[in-house]
Amino acid sequence: MEESDVALAIRAAEATPGVVRDQFRDPITRFDKEDDGFATQADLAAELTIHDILRAARPGDRFLAEESGTTGDPSDRTWLIDPLCGTRNFAAGTPLVAVNIALRAAPQSASRLVEIDADNP
């Protein structure tokens, strides 16, 4: 039986806290963006983890991720990924961050938000 979109989103989101937590309080590698924002190595690693899980399960879907942009062929199903919501908090050593994953698809949408508390694995 194929995994539901909701179960897949949850699995991808729950795979990410360990990736971020492993890098919490380590020296930050900062990657400036065009706007006033920046990403860290944790953003990139978390996004890759999420993307790999989603793409393996749904290779025909499109992905719009905060750090890597749009990938995949045009599709009526697009996964929206913010791998580390709270990058500034993370960089400052504040464990108030989250993972955001949503699926934009007609007529339904699946989404999941997972809080990552770096002090409580």
Image: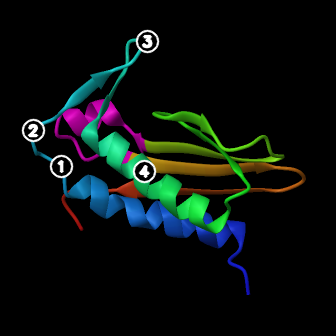
Q: Residue at x 63, y 72 (%)?
A: 7
Please give the range of residues in magenta: 84-97
Residue 119: percent from the left, percent from the top?
18, 59
The answer to whether the residue labelled 4 contacts the one labelled 3, judged by CB atoms less than 8 Å apart, is no
Instruction: Please rate how many residues cluster around mark 2, counting C-alpha atoms within 10 Å: few if below 14, some from 14 to 19, many from 20.
Output: few
Question: Judging from the image, what secondary structure is the residue with disc 3 in?
Answer: loop
**Looking at the image, can residue 31 be seen?**
yes
Q: Is residue 119 left or right of residue 102?
A: left
Q: What residue did someone put label 2 on?
A: 27
The disc label shown at residue 35, or none: 3
Q: Secondary structure at mark 2?
A: loop
Q: Which callout, 2 or 3, points at the residue further toward the start of the chain?
A: 2
Which label number is shown at residue 92?
A: none
Secondary structure found at label 1: loop
**Residue at the spot 90% in from the left edge and 53% down from the top edge:** 107
Question: Is tag 1's residue or tag 3's residue first in the polypeptide sequence?
Answer: 1
Real-space Cα separation, disc 1 to disc 3, in angstroms: 24 Å
Q: Which residue is mark 4?
A: 48
> How far is the residue under mark 2 from the one under mark 4?
20 Å
The reply to whether dot 2 and dot 4 touch (C-beta < 8 Å) is no
Q: Quadrant of residue 60?
A: bottom right
**Residue at x 61%, y 68% (from the top left corner):** 8
Q: Earlier in the sequence, mark 1 or mark 4?
A: 1
Mark toward the viewer: 1 or 4? 4
Which of discs 1 and 2 lies nearer the camera? The answer is: 2
- Most extreme residue toward the bottom is 1
In this figure, which residue is indicated by the disc labeled 1?
24
